[in-house]
Amino acid sequence: MATLAKHRDSKRRLTTGRVLTAIAIVWVCGSFGFWLVGKLPFALAGVAEQFAQSEGNKVTAPVDSSQPRLLRINLTLNDPKDLKVKQGDFLQVDAIISDREDERRRLQSQRSEYLSTIKILSLEPQKPLEPLSVRKAPELPPQSFAEFESEVDFQRLKVDRAKEQVSLQQRKIDLIGTLDAKDLPAGVEAHENQQLQKLKNDQAKEEALLQLQIGKFETAKANRGLKEYEVEEAKVRAALEANRTQMEYQNALAEFNRSQQERQFRLADLRSKVAEVDSKLQEISTVRAQYASEVKRVRFIKQVNNQIDVELLLYISDRTDKRIRSESSQTLEPFTKSSN
């Protein structure tokens, strides 16, 4: 009986040891399995990163495979609003991941303003017209005063004749005065005095006419001198007007040339600004998804000034994954529109 009891105790201890050994083996295998499962996604992500390629604004993934994979994408943003996806989103092929829409709109508006200004400045301004020649003052025709001089001379002759007749009449009267009154007819002296007075009146009349002719002559000469002065004054005014218009034309031409140089400089400056804006527009990239995928993680890494580094982790599957296809068609409609 004692031997049978020892045999049973020994068998029981052996069975217990085997059970404990099996439990230990199962525990070790399970721990290794859990560790392996935890490391497998990151190992697959490392393999995917080795085969990932980027071209232009598109993000590519490894060669198509029926097995799900992870793809890590690193982005640099200027504004958090540039990121168009969030964790848990399902992306269709060609869906927008990031896009700088505000910056693109600002640059396009700036470019339109530049082009509008270039169109206005490209209109060729009118060159100043050369001034018309100033009309010269007409020359006075030659004038002769011979007629006036002859009239004056003729009237002088009349005056001299009248003076001579008065002188003769006066001597006649003086001669009569020397004679005896008895020898003379009655009323002779009175008649001769009347004749003298008449001759004196004729002389005064002729002298008045002489002064009239002299006045006409002097007036004609004065009028001629006035006309000559007016002509000379008109010539001076015409010369001053010609100089003034010529100076105004030269000033306008200089201002036109200066504005032309300034216009060409502004056009060159605006064209360089348009080229600069075009270069900036080309630098603004739109990152799109190349594969149907799920955004597993969005992690903001760091920010330097206005640049934000973001890391996305996408779970990618082929087109046979009905879950991503059906869910993406419902959740990703806003991200399937491309931004021009």
Image (tube, grey):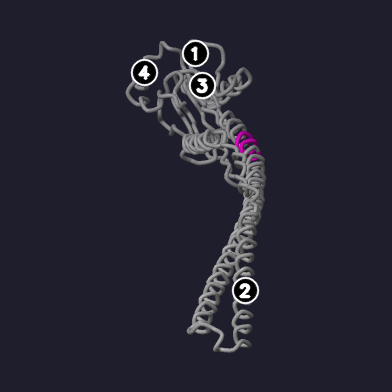
- The residue to which callout 1 is attached is 67
Q: Earlier in the sequence, mark 3 or mark 1?
A: 3
Mark 3 touching mark 4, by CB under 8 A? no
Q: Nearer the viewer, mark 1 or mark 4?
A: 4
The mark closer to the camera, 3 or 4, is 4
**Can you tell which of label 2 and label 3 is closer to the viewer?**
2
Amino acid type, mark 3: Ala
Per the image, label 3 sits on a secondary structure element best described as: helix
CA separation in Å, label 4 and label 2: 150 Å
Mark 2 to mark 1 CA distance (whole Å): 154 Å
Relative placement, left or right, of 262 versus 191 is right
Q: Which residue is mark 2?
A: 163
Judging from the image, what secondary structure is the residue with disc 4 in? helix
Q: CA distance from mark 2 to mark 3?
A: 182 Å
- Name the chief secondary structure element in magenta: helix
Of the two numbered discs 4 and 2 in the rendering, the one whose residue sits closer to the viewer = 2
Depth check: 29 or 103 in front? 103
State which quadrant residue 149 falls in.
bottom right
Q: Which mark is residue 323?
A: 4
Residue 167: tell me if it is visible.
yes
Mark pair 1, 4: CA separation: 14 Å
The disc labelled 2 sits on which kind of residue? Lys
